[in-house]
Image (cartoon, helix red, strand yellow):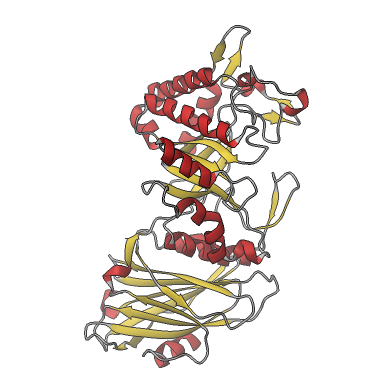
Amino acid sequence: MRFALFLSVFLTPTISLFSQVRLECDFSAPENRGNAMHYHWGISNRISPTRGFKIPVSDPPFINIVRPLGGKSKDGKMLIHEDTCKWDGANYVYDWSPLKQQLDSVIRRAAVYQVMIDNPPWAFQRGLSIREDERVETYGNAWPPGDPKAWSDYIKAMMTELVDTYGPTKVGRWRFCIGREIGTKGHWRGSMAEFFEHYRNTEQAIRSVLPEARVGTHFLWASSKNSFGPDFVKWCHRHRVRYDFVGVSYYPFFNRKDRVDLDHVYRVDFAPIKDIPEWNDQAALEIHEFSLIASMSKKGNSFENAPKPHQESFTVMLGAMMYAHDMTDVYRWGSGADKVAEKAFLSMRGDTYYKHSKSGKPKKPGNMVDAVFSHAVESNQYNLLVANYNANPKADQSETIDISMTVPFAPGSNITYRQATGQGERVTWTDWRSTRTRDSSESSTSILHLQLPLAPFTFKKIELRPKDTR
């Protein structure tokens, strides 16, 4: 009953004596109204899904197909038999069956969202001067094609085959991502300039067959040692090269504040790509690989996930950052099963997003708080999703958050509300309860003012409606 007491007692705007973090959202202000909320967690990465693969829980389950063209290896050996292009001693010979086997496998059980144009088939190492012990990288062939003209012809032939097989309408719904985690040695052994020219060559080949195809690329985060992202955006602007999206990787260690403080992370990792004058305002900045991790292997090709409660509360924090800065989509590796924070966001898909202000500082050491406010127009329901995260894995001091919401209800309106608390894999709901609003400075609006205690590594969702709409 504690939440009901707090909601009833603090209905008028007052100076809080209990909280140093204050969240304010005015639902009656047109300038705070944003776009319909996109669901960010509906796409999953799958490597060469030729047979069975784990189906994500999304509806529909969208798949990003990784390494579909070949250029793969196992135990340091080239898997040439899986390539879509081979050298017969005189010519490049195309074999589209491995690619179509992967596409058909996904189409039967899920939906193709994106096709990676990452590892070139091994035949494209022809013409390069490479030491034998450098031919095979961590993820296979990471070298630029030795013959750019032959590569362009290959991409044109691939696009023609896809359109002829699946039709221009279906292929037109797929996206094509040139390169993966460019900046890492395991994915790209060429220079920055060589990748930019490779991107242009590939992008032009794709669009020569399907002019309105959606094309982009994938880099490391902007503060990484070999981040090509900011330079790519500037280069494309200077040379008038088109991109529809830029993906970045984000693997934050759950106990490092500089990697989980999302105000800082956005400022150093995402803003240098998206918030520069040369950015294409029609493009999207996305996270193409993500996991909140406890450890990572030396090669960077495997990791251990953070504890479940940390993952769930951080998902809310990450979503708040993405909605605030108009970023889209977090590509996951797993299935998404039992992701309770993702489900909370799914329940808000299509809601109208509302901007809010955050002031003050957390009262307890290391706590970080953020929230998402939304309005479900059809049900006339107002939603608040708020989380508390801490880089100290043993943090246990709750933060009492001061929340003020201005709603377009007449003073004295009877409203109903309920609250969910998420921790780990569990979400518990209160029953629906009722209270009345109080006056604001405007006769047509009311203010709801509540004190919300929130433990580290938990999140809460509050839903409220005028009583006659429930």
Residue at the far left: name it: 443
Q: Nearer the viewer, residue 283 or 440?
A: 283
Q: Position of residue 398 (x, y in %)?
A: 60, 81
Question: Looking at the picture, does residue 216 appear above or below residue 364?
Answer: above
Q: Is residue 338 visible?
A: no
Left or right: residue 198 versus residue 444 is right
Q: Where, by quadrant of the figure, is residue 396 drawn?
A: bottom right
Which residue reaches farthest top? Answer: 90
Answer with left or right where residue 218 lies relative to residue 137.
left
Judged left or right of residue 188, residue 357 is left
Q: Nearer the viewer, residue 442 or 219?
A: 219
Q: Residue 335 vs residue 462: left or right?
A: right
Q: Residue at x 67, y 76 (%)?
A: 395
Rendered image quadrant of residue 142: top right
**Residue under the point 40% across and 63% down:** 348
Query: Which x, y percent locates residue 134?
Result: 74, 28
Along the viewing direction, whichever of 246 and 320 lies nearer the viewer: 246
| Residue 145 placement (x, y as % from top left) | 59, 24
Q: Quarter holding the C terminus?
A: bottom left
Outermost residue on the front side: it is: 238
Kindly tell me whether residue 385 is visible in this rendering: yes
Residue drawn at the location 71% of the way across and 36% of the way down: 138
